[in-house]
Image (cartoon, rainbow, N blue to C red):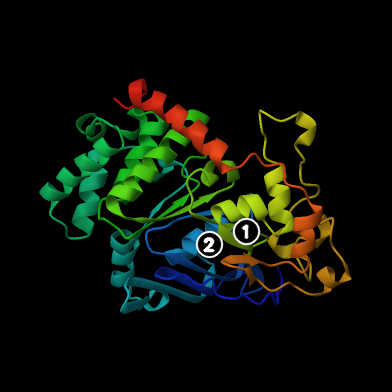
Amino acid sequence: MTAQHEQLTEPTEVDDPILEIRNASVTYDDGETYVLDDVTFAIERDEIVGVVGESGSGKSMFASAMLDAIPDPGKLSGEILYHPDEDTTIDVLNLSDDELRSYRWADVSMVFQGAMSSFNPTMKVGAHFKDTLRAHDQDVASGMDFARELLADLYLDPERVLDSYPHELSGGMQQRALIALSLLLEPEVLVMDEPTAALDLLMQRSILMLLEELQEKYEVTMVFITHDLPLVASLADRMAVMYAFELVEAAPRDQLIGDSGHPYTRALLNSTPNIDAPLEEMKPIPGQSPAPINVPDGCSYADRCPLATDECTATDPRFENVEDEHFVACHHWKQAKADIELNFAGADAAADSAAADNDGFLEGGEQR
């Protein structure tokens, strides 16, 4: 967008925040183009947050902002506050280069989209683990013992994987090895940017089940970035929806998928394929999301919204708490609940399907 929106954001308060993103914006072209616009969001310790949006919505920039890892020449402004415990606050954007390098692996780690592009194809997988340990001055012997434990937790043969080149592993095995690598230094927060996008449906759901097991065992906070709403709905405790580089809704999972207040969230839910429903019930969202250089004034969803009024095109709605822990940026959220019917099957069906698929995977899949 060529000028920053005037959306006001109300902090999403949580009881025990581990990460707080405050008024975070990412700009290019000397501040003229916004690809993340004044986003404020708090992440609670030990929760799993799903961040959902269409391609180009700004969700990957949101993920990168949490690690102060915006690609040049992008500029990140606002505040990223990390709370390793209740009494300590670290201002991430003011860390030195050495402190930031440690923060990115030891405190907050990231799984990037596409495991194959994350590994050096000329190095065995084990060498990636050893290099990471050496780079952070960790004992290699004990670190590799932990690496083997992580790989086994992900239903991989540790010795086979560590002694393989990336191309010798399947896509699902590569992705699980990358998840193990991201947990090697025992970070408090794991950010995952479309970690299952290149995998088939069975492997996607299986990995989600494994992530849930890892989260419980290692008590790691997870942020799962994806365009696949039903997939993350089977995993997340809380969900947030992005549109045109802003947050438009955030709520506990069941509340968001069962009683969402933003017309875009409802449209996104209703556009989700459901094999148990007639084809005519699937409703694609008309129009296209705006490009960064062409975001309209007022509500950025107004030109696609069936409830849009003159108020919507003139004034950007405030992102605020409209109900208990339910944040929405919409002038007409009450009308959206009343007038836009939801046809989404719900997260329970997705979770049941994932569990069934995962049982088969663990019994005889590609893990060994």
Residue at image location 47% in from the left, 35% down from the top: 205
Residue 259 to residue 355: above or below: below
Query: Along the line of sight, which residue is nearer the eye, 31 or 55?
Result: 55
Single out the mark in the foreground, 2 or 1. 1
Q: Are marks 2 and 1 in contact (CB under 8 Å)?
A: yes
Q: CA distance from mark 2 to mark 1?
A: 9 Å
Relative image position of residue 242 (x, y in whole percent): 62, 58
The residue at the point 35 percent across, 50 percent down is: 215
Name the one closer to the observer, 325 or 19: 325
Numbered badge on residue 294: none
* Secondary element type, mark 1: strand
Question: Quadrant of residue 315 in the image?
Answer: bottom right
* Residue in view at x 46 percent, y 44 percent: 195
- Asked if one can make out residue 124 in the rendered structure from this viewpoint, the answer is no
* Left or right: 278 in relation to 41: right
Q: Which residue is mark 1?
A: 242
Q: Earlier in the sequence, mark 2 or mark 1?
A: 2
Q: Quick one: SS at disc 2?
A: helix
> Residue 45: where, in percent of width, then height?
38, 63
Q: Position of residue 318 (x, y in %)?
A: 69, 74
Q: Is residue 71 above or below residue 99?
A: above
- Residue 136 left/right relative to 327: left
Q: Amino acid at mark 1?
A: Met
Q: Residue beneath label 2, please?
A: 62
